[in-house]
Image: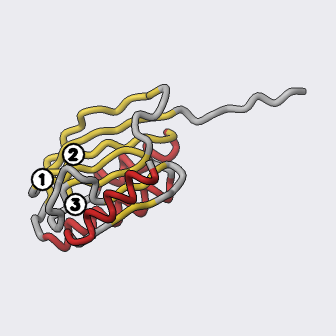
Amino acid sequence: MSRVATQTPLVAFAFDSLLSSDDRRMIERLAGQVWRDNVARGVTGEMRLEGWRVQQVVEGPADVILPLVARILADDRHGGIRITALEAISARRYGGWSVHGLPTATDAAAAVAWSDVDGRVVAFRRPAAAPAAVKEARRLA
């Protein structure tokens, strides 16, 4: 009897929301939690922050993403969630996880937090560290 390997289908979920607070510390904690949890679970995508507004795309195996969708929709830190995509995908579109626009960043064009699928991580919180972190991110890419 031969065994056929089954692979969990990939799913992408994208949404916009308004945060319940514009408190800088709360936003930094949220971004840190999202980054830590997504990297640990092998989720790829990005989070973009602009004041109270959040845009996020998460992608990965359906058995990881669908429970994550339920947690996001129940999270009281998000209000006015607008789902922009929930779909099966044939391949990942992102090579890792990134967060853009943290309140402590001076250059929103640079990834404030980044991790590739293999878990290599470059992160910085203080603007003074930005040039070195961007240089390291380019070296790892």
Badge 3 or badge 1: first in the primary sequence: 1
Amino acid under disc 1: Glu
Q: Dot 3, crowdedness within 10 Å: few (<14), some or many (≥20)?
A: few
Q: Dot 1, crowdedness within 10 Å: few (<14), some or many (≥20)?
A: some
Q: Where is residue 126, by image quadrant?
A: bottom left
Badge 2 or badge 1: first in the primary sequence: 1
Q: Residue furthest right?
A: 1
Find out whether the residues at labels 2 and 1 contact each other: C-beta distance under 8 Å: yes
The residue where tag 1 is placed is: 50
- In the rendered image, residue 5, in percent from the top left (x then y), is placed at 73, 32
Q: Is residue 68 left or right of residue 30?
A: right
Which residue is depicted at the point 49% across and 34% down?
A: 10
Circle 3 — which element? loop
- In the rendered image, residue 54, in percent from the top left (x then y), is placed at 18, 50
Q: Viewer-proximal residue, 82 or 59?
A: 59
The residue where tag 3 is placed is: 76
Q: Where is residue 123, by image quadrant?
A: bottom left
Which residue is depicted at the point 30% across and 67% down?
A: 124
Q: Is residue 91 left or right of residue 21?
A: right
For marks 2 and 3, give the CA distance.
16 Å
Amino acid under disc 3: Asp
Q: Is residue 47 above or below residue 122?
A: above
Which residue is depicted at the point 33% across and 63% down?
A: 133
- In the rendered image, residue 99, in percent from the top left (x then y), is placed at 29, 54
Q: Dot 2, crowdedness within 10 Å: few (<14), some or many (≥20)?
A: some
The residue where tag 2 is placed is: 55
Q: Quadrant of the N terminus?
A: top right
